[in-house]
Image (tube, rainbow, N blue to C red):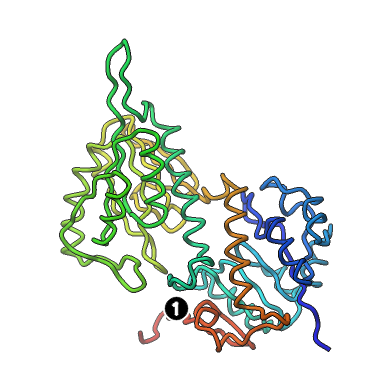
């Protein structure tokens, strides 16, 4: 007899995390399809969702985390389980989250030893079919919005141009480095606030997106677009050209928002200490890539530092600062993913039968299926 799929939703344990992996509306869509959904008590409180909201959605609320972990055969998370969680999960269960296997290879091996099947949603390819499941895009949009708001809040001047009886106030000059989803949202938000916005991205194709939002686009003269529409690493010669062009733009800006990243690698440093020393006192840098090492040479993750009167904000998990919408968006991404993971009869679909499933599966049947980083001394 086939066991019904039982989905577990846990309280995220990452510090200052207010989001939840499944909002009540999407949970109701699952229970309406005869799926069992267990929610750890208080899991949605940070995002404004009460336990009663989940009960109304047909979920079972459990006060004990261990009961959710041991009772579910499919666990949905925003991040990744810890060792204590893994020990309590039943063998052959399925985990969905954002695992970032290159950052946590030992955790992946631990999950493989427990014979868990694990899907890491940030690995989904950016294809048309995968758009509705793209957690990186949905959460990056929130991060870009928050980066602009954080910058405007800390900037010691007004963002828009104002014409008053006391004279005309010029708009703030905002530079956004990196025009992916987060960067484009930061551009759009800064424009709505009335700033004069300039943007830069190593991918030449990003210029059309930037200009469509009413911002200026800095042209490097090379195209560094890599596989899947992501940016590739620049050559040394390209880095020197980039440095010269960006330095002039940074020095003339009041607010710099950095969102430049390369998948699977440390964020490139695009604003040097020497450049910061030439900036006007009172200028602000919001580094949205602080968790990946930072785009600014002086960024400290989760901290705000000052250098010669310039404030550098190492923004960490800005998505959690808009937890209601961020949770709703993530939930919809997960629901869409579940539609290709589980068939209409309630069976798990063989990941080898679907390219999206196989692309983001990192371990299964006791084996690590995602390429692990080379250990020291190994041939590359």
Residue placed most toward the observer, 207 or 150? 207
Residue placed most toward the observer, 70 or 113? 70
Q: Residue 167, image x and y in percent?
A: 27, 14
Is residue 252 positioned above or below 358 on the image?
Answer: above
Q: Is residue 113 left or right of residue 179?
A: right
Label 1 crowd (10 A; few <14 / some 14-19 / many >=20)? few
Residue that appears at 42% across and 69% down: 264
Q: Residue 358, image x and y in percent?
A: 53, 83
Residue that appears at 77% across and 60% down: 39
Q: Is residue 62 left or right of residue 142?
A: right
Q: Is residue 280 left or right of residue 154?
A: left
Residue on which the image places disc 1: 373
Residue placed most toward the observer, 187 or 57? 57
Q: Residue 245, image x and y in percent?
A: 17, 50
Is residue 357 positioned above or below 41 on the image?
Answer: below
In the rendered view of the protein, which quadrant contains the C terminus? bottom left
Residue 69 picture quarter: bottom right
Q: Is residue 76 left or right of residue 72?
A: left
Residue 345 picture quarter: bottom right
In the rendered view of the protein, which quadrant contains the N terminus? bottom right
Numbered circles on residues, count: 1
Q: Residue 372, image x and y in percent?
A: 48, 80
For numbered disc 1, what is the local secondary structure?
loop
Residue that appears at 47% across and 46% down: 315
């Amino acid at each position: 007899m086939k066991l019904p799929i039982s989905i577990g939703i846990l309280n995220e344990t990452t510090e200052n995390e207010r989001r939840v992996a499944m909002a009540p509306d999407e949970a109701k869509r699952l229970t309406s399809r005869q799926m069992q959904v267990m929610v750890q008590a208080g899991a949605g409180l940070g995002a404004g969702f009460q336990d009663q909201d989940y009960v109304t959605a047909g979920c079972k609320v459990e006060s004990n985390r261990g009961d959710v972990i041991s009772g579910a055969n499919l666990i949905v998370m925003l991040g990744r389980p810890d060792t204590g969680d893994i020990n309590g999960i039943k063998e052959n269960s399925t985990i969905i989250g954002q695992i970032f296997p290159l950052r946590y290879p030992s955790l992946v091996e631990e999950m493989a030893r427990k014979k868990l099947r694990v899907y890491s949603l940030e690995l989904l390819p950016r294809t048309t079919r995968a758009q509705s499941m793209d957690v990186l895009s949905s959460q990056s949009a929130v991060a870009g919005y928050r980066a602009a708001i954080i910058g405007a809040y800390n900037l010691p001047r007004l963002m828009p141009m104002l014409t008053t009886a006391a004279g005309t106030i010029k708009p703030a000059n905002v530079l956004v480095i990196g025009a992916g989803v987060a960067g484009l949202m930061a551009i759009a938000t800064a424009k709505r606030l009335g700033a004069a916005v300039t943007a830069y991205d190593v991918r030449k194709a990003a210029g059309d997106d930037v200009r469509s939002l009413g911002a200026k686009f800095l042209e490097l003269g090379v195209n560094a677009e890599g596989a899947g529409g992501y940016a590739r690493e620049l050559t040394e010669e390209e880095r020197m050209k980039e440095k010269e062009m960006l330095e002039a733009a940074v020095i003339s800006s009041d607010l710099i928002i950095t969102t430049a990243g390369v998948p699977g690698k440390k964020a490139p440093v695009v604003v040097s200490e020497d450049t910061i020393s030439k900036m006007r006192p009172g200028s602000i840098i919001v580094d949205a890539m602080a968790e990946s090492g930072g785009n600014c040479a002086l960024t400290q993750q989760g901290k705000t530092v000052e250098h010669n009167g310039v404030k550098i904000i190492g923004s960490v998990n800005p998505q959690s600062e808009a937890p209601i919408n961020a949770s709703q968006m993530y939930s919809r991404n997960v629901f869409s993913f579940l539609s290709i993971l589980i068939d209409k009869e309630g069976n798990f679909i063989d990941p080898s039968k679907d390219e999206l499933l196989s692309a983001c599966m990192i371990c299964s049947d006791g084996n690590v299926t995602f390429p692990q980083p080379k250990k020291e001394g190994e041939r590359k």
